Amino acid sequence: MAEPALRRTSIRRRLLLFLITSLLFMVAGAAVVTYIVAVHATNDAYDRSLLDPAEDIAANVRVDSSGTHVDLPQLALSALMFDQVDRIVFQVRSAGNEYVDGASELPPPSDVRPGQAVFFDSVYDGEPIRVAAVRTLDGTVVQVGETLNKRNKLMREILFAEVVPTLLVGAVAIALAWFGVKRGLLPLERVRSELMRRSPHDLRPLPETAAPMEIAPVADAFNRLLDRLREAHAMQQRFLANAAHQLRTPLAGLQMHGELLLRRPDLPADARAELERMHTATIRASRLANQLLALAKAESEPRQTPRLELIDLATVADAAARDWAPKALTHKIDLGFCLEPAMIVGDPVLLPELLNNLIDNALRYTPAPGAVTVNTGQQDDMAYLCVEDTGPGIPIEEKHKVVERFYRMPGRTGDGSGLGLAIVKEVVDRHAGVLEIRPRDDEAPFSVRVLFPRAQSVQSQNA
């Protein structure tokens, strides 16, 4: 049964989620507490002012033979009930809970003991009110109700004065948390950038100061792994280089003896045919050994390669012209050169190997009579080396595959080993260049173009 795929977790996301959620809960809790405090503070302040008219009316309630009545002039009652903001009403009920005076629509209060004052919320005329109720010693109940305009206004002011600074503090805290987490994770980002900039063959250990203390054990384990990989890679490269080097001498001898045998005039026809096939196979094996040796050099660690030098690509191409002109004539290929100065900082061993592989591929796959042209020059901040040919070229869907080792396109004839463009790609990567493979079309021939940083650009970056 397949194990379920594990989701990637982000330390940044987990930290920010925890911190921001905690801050939001704190802000929400502070807002709730502020609201509760505002309600209690507002009610305490206005309940005391609401109790005064209730006690004044209760002090002027008289019970006589005519019944219970309020012994206050209408003008005095109006003065007690006056308010510029809220609407105030009162009600008086006898000891038997019978309506005596005031607003009859007020509902009767809950149980109030004699000499006690209670406060509660109610509704009058469809509007919420706050009520203060007082029961005198003789059982008379006086209620005074007030709408909530002043209370709501004061509550909003308290909430605004308390919640807005809390929200601002929360927002600043979230911003600081975001910035702090980002700044705290910068060492991890530097380690990631350091690793992403490296080529697949750069197995140098991470600097001890690159990783923060919290992930130092991980960095140490990673460096130990890199050490083992570096040793295994070096062993593989030594084996490949030694094997290729040891094969070159016997293959060169075998090729020489084959050529000497082919020169004999008394050689039977069937033996000559077999010998020619053997000679061709020997040439292919010798070329393969040379390419394996070149690949081992291209894949070697930077510290194992010769010191980089200031090189003109035009000079490299001019030297290649003398080496490849005889073979081009043999294959009836017009080998041309259009060379302009193109100065780069590069490896004097690997760059000729790169160009030799490009010219060799072009000559092998260009049918006679054809043309191969080598161009060098400068474009913006880049120097370029380009090999064009009139051969079939490489389809656009295959251009990412042909740089793999030993890959040969289906149906393509030729005696290539599939290592030429792989070596080119390794050399290009070593020089921080760009490899462009442009398929053939009606307007332009097939071309392989390599762009290198110009010498002045490289020197200015290193300055």
Image: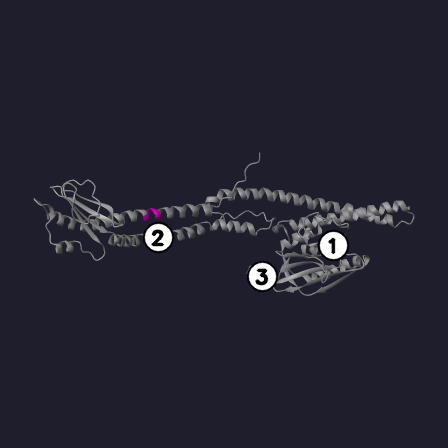
Percent from the top left, x then y, of residue 331?
81, 57
Q: Which residue is mark 2?
A: 167
Which numbered disc flags the more N-terminal residue, 3 or 1? 1
Q: Main secondary structure of the magenta part?
A: helix
Badge 1, how many Cα within 10 Å: few under 14, some, many 20+? some
Which numbered disc flags the more N-terminal residue, 3 or 2? 2
Residue 30 falls within the magenta-colored stretch: yes
Percent from the top left, x then y, of residue 77?
14, 53
Which picture quadrant has residue 351? bottom right
Q: Do labels 1 and 2 touch, CB within 8 Å?
A: no
- Between circles 1 and 2, the one closer to the viewer is 2
Q: Quadrant of the C terminus?
A: bottom right
Q: Is residue 384 left or right of residue 210?
A: right
Badge 3, how many Cα within 10 Å: few under 14, some, many 20+? few
Residue 304 falls within the magenta-colored stretch: no
What residue is rendered at 37% in x and 46% in y? 25
Q: Which residue is mark 3?
A: 459
Q: Secondary structure at mark 3?
A: helix
Indicate the amino acid at tag 1: Asn
Nearest the eye: 312 or 200: 200
Q: Is residue 48 left or right of residue 171?
A: left
Region rendered in magenta: 27-31
Q: Is residue 13 left or right of residue 272?
A: left
What residue is rendered at 63% in x and 44% in y? 233
Q: Is residue 253 visible in this depiction of the protein?
A: no
Q: Secondary structure at mark 1?
A: helix
What residue is rendered at 38% in x and 53% in y? 171
Alpha carbon distance from label 3 to label 1:
33 Å
Q: Do labels 3 and 1 touch, CB within 8 Å?
A: no
